[in-house]
Image: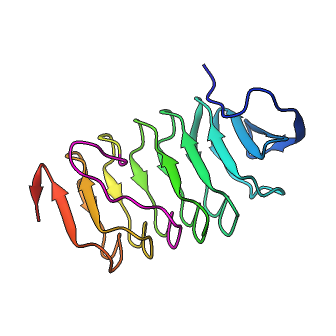
Amino acid sequence: VPLAFAENSTIVDSGTSGENATWELDSEGTLTISGTGKVTDKFPVSPKRVVVNDGITEIGDGVFNHSSLQSLKLADSVKTIGKEAFCECYSLTQIELGRGLKTIKEDAFAYAAVELDIVYPATMLPDSLEVIEKYAFYGCPIKTIYIPKNVRVIEPESFGWNIEKYIVNEETV
């Protein structure tokens, strides 16, 4: 079942991004990405919301950087978020990462407004996550973060200077 935000809207623009990915922008400002494989091209529109449907496996480098995006919802099929994919999205405050995500690359969400202050067991980072590259959430207003048990690599300054508490395997470090 495709993910969606707006039910009573009309399509105002559409196109492709990559070999097998298509997108539609509706009148409510929601960009819905469908198809299979990697999303590779920067979009000619600046949506308020992005919904990535099942079948898409990767959000490519820089695809949404510097956009006015406010919310993001990724399907469980997305395994990788590319370098600077959502970098400097200053209005991006709500993200829902799919349960199949394995890698968040360098600067993926750097300087976005994403707040990850959470208390275990609630988590925004999925248990499937294995790698968080350097500066992935650098400059985000994060104070506390729960690191899922499958994470095996956290590169330097992945969360920047704001972190006051890491919770790893239910222990504060």
**From which residue to which does the magenta span run?**
109-125
Q: Is residue 127 above or below residue 84?
A: above
Q: Is residue 162 above or below residue 165?
A: below
Q: Residue at x 24, y 54 (%)?
A: 147
Q: Residue at x 59, y 30 (%)?
A: 55
Compare residues 89 and 157 and report the one nearer the observer. 89
- Work out which residue is located at the far bottom of the displayed protein and give it: 161
Q: Position of residue 13 (x, y in %)?
A: 89, 43
Q: Does the segment drawn in magenta span residue 121? A: yes
Q: Position of residue 46 (x, y in %)?
A: 77, 58
Q: Is residue 17 left or right of residue 10?
A: left
Q: Is residue 161 above or below residue 62?
A: below
Compare residues 159 and 7 and report the one nearer the observer. 7
Q: Position of residue 117 (x, y in %)?
A: 32, 59
Q: Residue at x 43, y 66 (%)?
A: 136
Question: In which quadrant is the C terminus drawn?
Answer: bottom left
Question: In which quadrant is the N terminus drawn?
Answer: top right
Q: Is residue 23 left or right of residue 112?
A: right
- Work out which residue is located at the far top of the displayed protein and give it: 1
Count of all numbered marks drawn on residues in the image:
0
Q: Is residue 98 above or below residue 85?
A: above
Q: Position of residue 61 (x, y in %)?
A: 61, 61
Tell me which secondary structure the magenta stretch mostly adopts: loop
Q: Is residue 37 left or right of residue 12?
A: left
Q: How is the image coloured?
A: rainbow
